[in-house]
Amino acid sequence: MILAFLVFFPMIAAVISYLIGKRSKGKRDNFVILSCLATLLGAGYALVCAAKGAVITYEVPVFCGFGLHFELDGFRALYALIGGVMWLCTSMLSKQYFAHHYHNRNRYYFFYLMTLGATLGVFLSSDLYTTFIFFEIMSFTSYTWVMHDETPGAIRAAETYLAVAIIGGMVMLMGLFLLYLTLGTLTISELHHAAEACTSRGTLWAASICILCGFGAKAGMFPLHIWLPKAHPVAPAPASALLSGILTKSGIFGIIVVSANIFRESKAWGNMLLVLALITMLGGAVLAVFSVNLKRTLACSSMSQIGFILTGISMSCLLGHHNALAARGALLYMLNHSLFKLILFMAAGVVYMHLHKLHLNDVQGFGRKKPLLHFAFLMGAFGLMGVPGFSGYVSKTLIHEAIVEYVHLLQHEGMNAAAIPYSIAEWVYLFSGGLTGAYMIKLYICLFWQKHPHEQIFYDNKKRYMNALSTLAVMGSAVLVPILGAQPNLTMDVIADFAGGFLHAGTPEHAVHYFTWVNLKGACISLGIGLVVYLFVIRRFLMKKENGVVTYIDLWPANWDMEDRLYRPVIAKLLDLGGAFAQIGNEQKLEERVYWPAVRGLVRIGGGFANLISEDSLENRIYWPLIRTLSFAGAVVSKLLGDVLDEIALIITRTMLQMKHYTESIRVGNIVTDTVGGAADKFAEVLNHTLLRNHPKAHHYTGMLAGFWNGMMAAVRRMTHTMSYGLVLFGLGLCAMLVYLLLY
């Protein structure tokens, strides 16, 4: 029952916390912290069970042979523990973070605990069907984090997040259908043998790429990363820590399932994933170097670090049976990145809850004379940069040595030309690590060494900047970084041995000597590159000093945005193309090829019926009753549909979203509705001059048809006047589909 407790207890606690919050905010905050503590204790018990070798499974039976299946092993227990730690720490910080200047805290905590249960459901799932169910629940519940502040920027970022989540989820579902059709199973432990016996390799690849797109979107993998730099700066800092630290790892979880089972030794899959990893790694680092927003820099850093993890997974596929270093490095990098982003985003939260600003020109100097915050940020920065002696150095070194190992393997087999691209990949890896050092040095110097030109005395006088709970959360996570990194053979290697089975990691031929020059060399090269980039690029081109005042310059072009420059225009063009298809040629050709043939066909059909019965009977018993019925039904349906959708929108905005005062100017109609509307008007005109031209009530009935069409178009416009509204409704439809899958 421990698995059921870990998944469903936080969801039940979410409802209870919401009810408590209606009466007492303080009691609700304490209840949330205690609920996270209980979940952490449960995860600790699960970890002990997994360490003893206990095989624990749990099933929620559902009809038609499907169900929710959970399983416990080393990796799953480890990430349940990480989830418990991260939610407990962020809940402790949240009490102070939300104490002032925030509203809708009851809503936040409800979805906060719901997301905890859904995230643990992903990591404890034993089949991809269960993974998908909780993956989608997690996407919808975490959506409210992004739009929590309800500012125009937050709503726009939440719209992007929801769009990526929904589209990625639907593509993933399509891939799961194909995978089940091809392999006959979605159970993770059965995928490898089923894939080896599969002869439909094309279908298998198509299914796997769809699944990769779905999970890669959540992980922040290029080119599906567009939500990540937008969502983190606008979300509350505790939520940003979870979005970056563990929700992205749920995407990595799915990528590992596909890579380590279906394509365990596939060089083609490994090479494809490596290319995506290198672009993600380097692209995120470049964005972070240019960023002048504290949380946006950390968000772009998360994108880059996901690229490092994907590099380890791709090298594991390329190395096959020799994947010990690569697979263990990817696993430990996941663990380390979760820890580092927990520390760094909580530190950023401490800054923001006092200043309510994030621009580097506004926050510079805030960390001076604040030794606890200074220590915590430094631990996160050193770990992320891969400084020897800290835990991040271990995972960076393992993945780097895996690349070097594969290069040597190819050269040993006489494939020197084939080894060149991987040597280039090694230098991209080292250079990206150098950029990590550069932007972290930039943040560190800005916060803790530079002085604000006007507010420094005010910043220095903030002595009680963290209460006891916040201090425990920030410092408790920060001290883990040097503890894990000082003796990696006793800490990190033990963790890799315990959890590496999920990645099918091999056993190293000998113990890794982390602090020999061979291994230290890569870290020294990256740190040297970082120092050079900071001194000769950031300080010379991205900063300026006038009259003793240091100012950070934003040189990144505002219009270099993939969403605005590529994705939204493409979607708009597709809509325009759909509308253009309605306009077949010019109006004369449309009349000749569509309207008149349709009218003649209707006339012939009417004439055929007229031969069976008299014209008066046909008109009185069929035509006019049918027109009246259609007009009345159309008006009723349009009215009901519009009222129902308006009521749904009202409930969503006033309860779950609580956006009572938010309004947005809209453009009524689009090329599709305008074109189809014009076609309907033309058809009504033709009908009026042919079938109804001699009828005394012709104008009355054509008016009824026009009213029916206008009502229907009004309903359509109400459904589609904003992208975010449409996404919410589409999300409700997807939820209904999930319920159907669960019950039937």
Image (cartoon, helix red, strand yellow):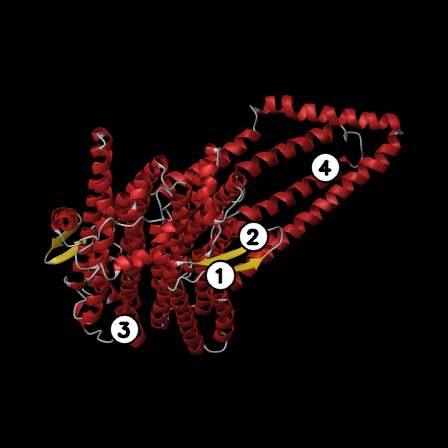
Residue 89 percent coordinates (x, y): 34, 68
In the depicted view, which residue is nearer to us: 384 or 60? 60
Residue located at (55% from left, 23% from top): 585
Label 4 to label 3: alpha-carbon separation: 71 Å
Residue located at (12% from left, 54% from top): 545
Along the polypeptide, which appears first: circle 1 or circle 3? Answer: 3
Mark 4 falls on what kind of element? helix
Along the polypeptide, which appears first: circle 4 or circle 2? Answer: 4
Q: How crowded is the residue under tag 2: few (<14 C-alpha within 10 Å), some, or many (20+)?
A: some
Instruction: Please say if the residues under marks 4 and 3 sit with CB atoms less than 8 Å apart.
Output: no
**Which amino acid type is shown beneath numbered disc 2?**
Leu
Query: Which picture quadrant has residue 467?
Result: bottom left
Instruction: Please say if the residues under marks 3 and 2 sit with CB atoms less than 8 Å apart.
Output: no
**Which amino acid type is shown beneath numbered disc 3?**
Met
Numbered disc in front, either 4 or 3: 3
Label 1 to label 2: alpha-carbon separation: 22 Å
Residue 325 percent coordinates (x, y): 26, 48
Residue 466: which numbered mark, if any? 3
Question: Could one spot residue 554 in this view of the protein?
Answer: no
Residue 386 percent coordinates (x, y): 20, 54
Left or right placement of residue 681 versus residue 15 in this view: right
Residue under pointer 4: 702
In the depicted view, which residue is nearer to us: 53 or 282? 53
Label 1 to label 4: alpha-carbon separation: 42 Å
Label 3 to label 2: alpha-carbon separation: 42 Å
Residue 738: which numbered mark, if any? 2
